[in-house]
Amino acid sequence: MPRQLQPAPAASPSPTPSSQRTIQTAQLVAAMLKARTHVSDLIFSPGRAPQIEVSGQLVELKYKGLECLTAQDTALIANDIMAKNESAARKLEQDGSADLSYGVAGVARFRVNIFRQRGSCAIVMRVVPDKIPGFQELNLPPALKEIVDLRNGVVLVTGPTGSGKSSTLAAILDKMNEDKAYHILTIEDPIEFLHRHKKATIHQRELHSDTPTFALALRAALRQAPKVILVGEMRDRETIEIALEASETGHLVMSTLHTIDASKTVERIVGVFPMADQQAIRTRLAKAFRCIVSQRLLPRKDGNGRIAAVEVLKSTMRTREYVEKGENEGKTLLDAMRDGSTEGMQHFDGEIEKLIRAGIVDFETGLSYSTNAGNLRLEMADYLDGSQNQGISQDPNQTAEFER
């Protein structure tokens, strides 16, 4: 008998979807999205009820008949999501995981990862907004609008998984689409935001569906006359090399890396190469990079979602020197960002301090997301003095999540 996706009494109120099958995945997904505001992810795991992530916290939704998903349940949901996507099914079979996009008409689009664990399937679905967000909506610094006018070079957006990298790149690309009569080519895994032709012409290629690898698609892009190339991720040495080559031949290349700040981004790129090649890569990267944007999403004090703290490293004579020659005591990229506010640069701890002082982020939360909690605490000594009666901790031994 088909299961009815009716919330159990303990679940949050949401519309009761109907079902004509064991599980009607599209209706289940729609109901889960309506259960709370600020839902960022949906998770289906055997042995648990369906879950949503809200402002970084998991919430179970115990629908009647789905209070505890079975391996058969998650396999059915996975098959529904993959549908006729043979490449995703093949990747799941061969590699144990598959990335793909999925959409529910009139509801939302998702970036999906299906993976095997303990002999069964689990699914994580990242919500991709239908509307491409704007700079103000994402709390992006005005300096990032300058990227739209760049003619060549490399722009990197970095941060942990779920820090908003794709949204930031989509906002930049959409602004470019509105303002520039360019040919723009994206290579994504999977395609998240759908870009319509505006002033620019945009072609979006998806890994495994339209091309087998980032590197192969990037190499082909050099023959497809784009002005701007977006590469979903700099995953390997070959992709990095071709991206540098593309920037050196007059293209603007934008991509992402899973690094926590600008300094670590440079070291990650250089570290991909053998020691004998690293100085040459430093020199090429110093000449090619235009901007490195790093992001962290912090929970808002009012519980109303999360807000971005953004670090911006721009190409100047000083920062190019530090990239090429490496960082030393007193000559670091962080020092350059601290001193570069007039050039549009900013660093994490300075931005987190602003969020705390504005009452947007809790003090302890801000410390936990800072690069150097001890330094930030010293910078905010006056704030602490005025907040002693509010119970703010002044433990000097507190360490930060991102402290190096």
Image (cartoon, rainbow, N blue to C red):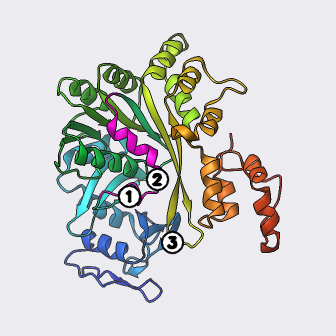
In x, y percent, where is residue 183?
19, 36
Q: Is residue 226 left or right of residue 175?
A: left
Q: Is residue 210 left or right of residue 296?
A: left
User: Label 2 belongs to which residue?
Assistant: 162
Q: Which residue is located at x 40 percent, y 78 percent?
A: 35
User: Label 3 belongs to which residue?
Assistant: 304
**Quarter of the rendering occupied by the N terminus:** bottom left
Q: Is residue 143 magenta?
A: yes
Front residue of this view, candidates 234 and 350: 350
**Quarter of the rendering occupied by the C terminus:** top right
Residue 232 appearing in the image:
no
User: Label 1 belongs to which residue?
Assistant: 126
Front residue of this view, candidates 74 and 293: 293
Q: Using the image, determine if residue 325 lies above or below residue 229.
A: above
Q: Using the image, determine if residue 233 lies above or below residue 135.
A: above
Q: Main secondary structure of the magenta part?
A: loop
Give the mark nearest the N terminus, 1 or 2.
Answer: 1
The kind of secondary structure element at disc 1 is strand
**Furthest-front residue in this view:** 342
The kind of secondary structure element at disc 2 is loop
Q: Is residue 97 magenta?
A: no
In x, y percent, where is residue 291?
45, 34
In x, y percent, where is residue 276?
53, 10
Front residue of this view, candidates 258 and 395: 395
Q: Quadrant of residue 226?
A: top left
Give the mark nearest the N terminus, 3 or 1.
Answer: 1
Mark 1: few/some/many CA within 10 Å (<14, 14-19, 20+): many
Residue contact between numbered discs 1 and 2, judged by CB atoms under 8 Å: yes
Amino acid type assigned to the residue bearing label 2 in the image? Gly
How far separated are the C-alphas under marks 1 and 2?
9 Å
Amino acid type assigned to the residue bearing label 1 in the image? Arg
How far separated are the C-alphas under marks 2 and 3?
17 Å
